[in-house]
Amino acid sequence: MRRVVMVILDGLRPDFVTEANTPNLVRFTRQAERFGAFRSAFPSATRVVSATFATGCFPARHTLQGNAVALLENGVLVPHDVGKPDFLQHKRRVTGHSLAVPTLAERLAPHGGPQGGAVVFNNVSPGAARAHDPDGFGLVYHRAVSLGPGLTPVDNPLRVTLDAAGDRAMTERFLAEAVHAYRPPFALLWCGEPDHIQHNVPMGSAEHRAVLREADRHAGMVIDAVAKERDRGDDILLIIGSDHGHETVSGVIDIEADLIEAGLKAGPDSHDIVSLANGTSALIYLDPARASLKSGLEDFLRSRAWAGQVIGGAELATIGHAEHQGLVFAVSMASDRENNDFGVPGRSLAAKPRWDKADRLGCGQHGGLGFYERAPVLMIDGEDFSAGTMTDRAARIVDLAPTIMRHLRVPADGMDGHALQRAH
Ligand SMILES: [Zn+2]
């Protein structure tokens, strides 16, 4: 049987893959092809990366623009936290679709058993978990919400904590139920570590490094389990990687306060201009009825020292976006490659988050186009990949779904990405 097993260690940086931190991943590099030029989506944030992965399409096509977004509801810009479990169902009611193009779960449903063709075990935010299969074609297990086909609750929901111990318990269930028993065409394990610890302690600290070793053990458990299944005769493509890296937060900028002070935005709750923080980036929305503000807004953003890159208009296509739902500018916050106190390079300003979320000053964050946050880990082991090599050929998040479909011999028409298998 041909199938695909994939592990994401959320937030893992390639420079953290060392013999001391991640011996199992170093061992895996001997049997896998490693992609040194792998790039995340924009924003480099889990929910939008999840939707981009699941559809093989950029945000301009699947229409989930960020981890925090605005929707035009009855002509009014309304800010939303995409991490909430029901956001994509709300988006469906407002815009007509959760994601505007099909997911792997939908495409693979006819190729699996009664529980569908895709099984996802996920320990990040509920909104990110739901982005893999918002309309219920397969199985999605998450500590807050576990659903099967038709969005019906499963009999045995995932009950774990968001930490290394929770990832461990989830990995054990993933292996027993998905990899060894149900054996769907596509089984995905998306661990919450090391992202969770990196948001809460300085990168490179002893506490961080201890969790890196735990995350690596979970990858090692899957590597060993896949070897057993291959011995049984299955042709398994094994993908291990991450969704984005992290930068150390060097300062926090309240973009909306700056806009109000400049006289561009009327007040904290006004709907004329809405800035949605996405970690080290921000999405800037403009009420379509206030289009006359746009050039002044652009001049203002480009004049700010905190704005590393300001991307708008047709240029949005270069980062996979389009003017849609009032989105007019994307800002990647200013970043540099200086070290933090533990010798870990890469610092960035962050946009001040809404909803009283933690600002992560001195700890890890991501979302922008900084050098370390936009370059995650990717290693692929299986047919048409070169074991033990490091390649610099281009690879993007959108290329993973077509790669999975190629291995499964299922057409991947209509995706933005391209399969990464080497030509025969
Ligand atoms: Zn992530």
Image: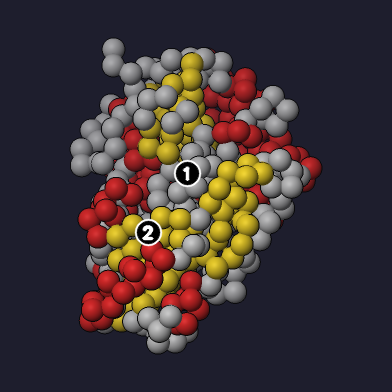
Give left or right: position of 56 versus 80: left
Position in image of residue 195 (x %, y %): 61, 48
- Say the numbered circle drawn on residue 310: 2
Give left or right: position of 154 versus 324: right
User: Mark 1: which secondary structure?
Assistant: loop
Q: Which residue is mark 1?
A: 374
Along the line of sight, the residue nearer the viewer: 404 or 269: 269
Residue at screen point 28% across, 73% down: 294
Total tally of numbered discs in the picture: 2
Position in image of residue 153 (x %, y %): 47, 59
Position in image of residue 45 (x %, y %): 48, 53
Residue 343 sits in quarter = top right
Residue 407 sits in quarter = top left
Position in image of residue 267 (x %, y %): 44, 87
User: Mark 2: which secondary structure?
Assistant: strand
Height in image: 302 above or below 8? below
Residue at far right of view: 206
- Say the numbered circle drawn on residue 317: none
Along the line of sight, the residue nearer the viewer: 269 or 99: 269
Height in image: 74 above or below 180? below
Q: Is residue 295 visible?
A: yes
Q: Residues within 10 Å of mark 2 (few under 14, many from 20)?
A: some
Along the line of sight, the residue nearer the viewer: 79 or 165: 79
Residue at screen point 45% across, 49% down: 369
